[in-house]
Image (cartoon, rainbow, N blue to C red):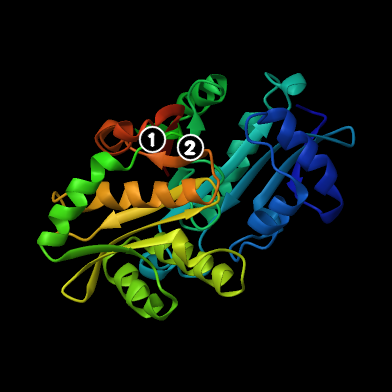
Amino acid sequence: MTDTLIRAYRSEDESALLALWSASLPFDAIDAATFRLKVLLDPNFYPDWLLVAEQKGLLAGFCLCLIRRVPMDKGGLDPESGWITAMGVHPDRRRQGIGAALLDRALELFRNASRKQVLLSPYTPNYFVPGVDVHHYAEGLAFLEKRGFVVTSRPLSMDANIVLLDPRPYQERERALQAQGIQISPLQPHQVPDLMSFLQEHMPGDWVRHGRELLADISRGRGSWAQFTLAWHQGQVVGYCQSEGEHFGPFGVRDGMQGQGIGTVLLARCLRAMQARGHHHAWVLWTSDENAEKVYGRFGFKETRRFAVLRRQL
């Protein structure tokens, strides 16, 4: 470790960092455009908080740390929390203390910023994956647990082939909803205020951001209003779902209206719309074990990856 320098990211590091990222996190490599959009242009990014480990002029490891400097809708500033959204050491440089040195410096940054906990890695708006892939990065998970991080949840990502999706089993359920005065329909442009009011009142803060950004793209002609499907009752939105390319979600139904099959019909209608746009697959980045079979399994979704969300108290 005597020849290892832990320092802040510099602009000239970009190519080397991306190569390091790809080597150390081979299932989560990113390109330059994604790095600039989701890291450099993140409103909470500061170069001093992207730590790199340098050995003889070469990058050997990195750790991307964030605290919220700009409020996030309902979540505010989260003044007690900090996040590590990506961390890695080159496979050829492991077991030399580089990861430990990076983590020690990262925890020092968080303590100096008066944080009480560090999370890995459900940071919004720009997380890459929900946490540590428990199968493909088992070594990294063991490293973090050894250093005081505890697993708080184990979300999973799921994928489904929707080429042969049959909507008929859900049409009877939709007719039953209609008999109760609940209508399921694609979003119309003039209904954007209704959707945004629903999201702001009933859905998590990051869902508001996600919906707003997709609506902005559609308004610029980069998408279709049919990417949103809404559930209506007595003139109010009571549920919604959205898709972007083959990415399905998020979707949700307001409290008090759940348990009636609204979510199932929304999911069926949204997947059918994706199918009609020529998509062969649908994927969900993050869901719970409870939702896996109850919500997605009936539509043919199967687990693709399992993650560990981690927390360390400071």
Q: Quadrant of residue 256?
A: bottom left
In the drawing, does residue 270 fall left or right of residue 135?
Answer: left
Q: Position of residue 160 (x, y in %)?
A: 45, 33
What's the amino acid at mark 1?
Pro
Observer-nearest of 174 and 126: 174
Mark 2: which secondary structure?
loop
What's the amino acid at mark 2?
Gly
On the image, numbered disc 2 is attached to which residue? 131
Give the residue drawn at x 56%, y 19%.
139
In the drawing, does residue 298 fall left or right of residue 228?
Answer: left
Q: Which of the labelled discs sits on residue 155, or is there none?
A: 1
Depth-wise, is mark 2 or mark 1 nearer the camera? 1
Tell me, yes or no, if residue 256 can be seen here.
no
User: Counting residues from the N terminus, which is met first, the one under dot 2 or under dot 1?
Assistant: 2
Mark 1: which secondary structure?
loop
Give the residue drawn at x 34%, y 60%.
204
Q: Quadrant of residue 185?
A: bottom left
Work out whether 229 lies above or below 119. Answer: below
Callout 1: 10 Å neighbours few (<14), some, many (20+)?
A: many
Residue positioned most to the right: 57
Q: Quadrant of residue 149?
A: top left
Tell me, yes or no, if residue 121 can be seen here.
yes
Q: Position of residue 213 (x, y in %)?
A: 53, 67
Spatial separation of the CA atoms under disc 2 and disc 1: 8 Å
Q: Position of residue 271 (x, y in %)?
A: 41, 46
Observer-nearest of 113 and 127: 127
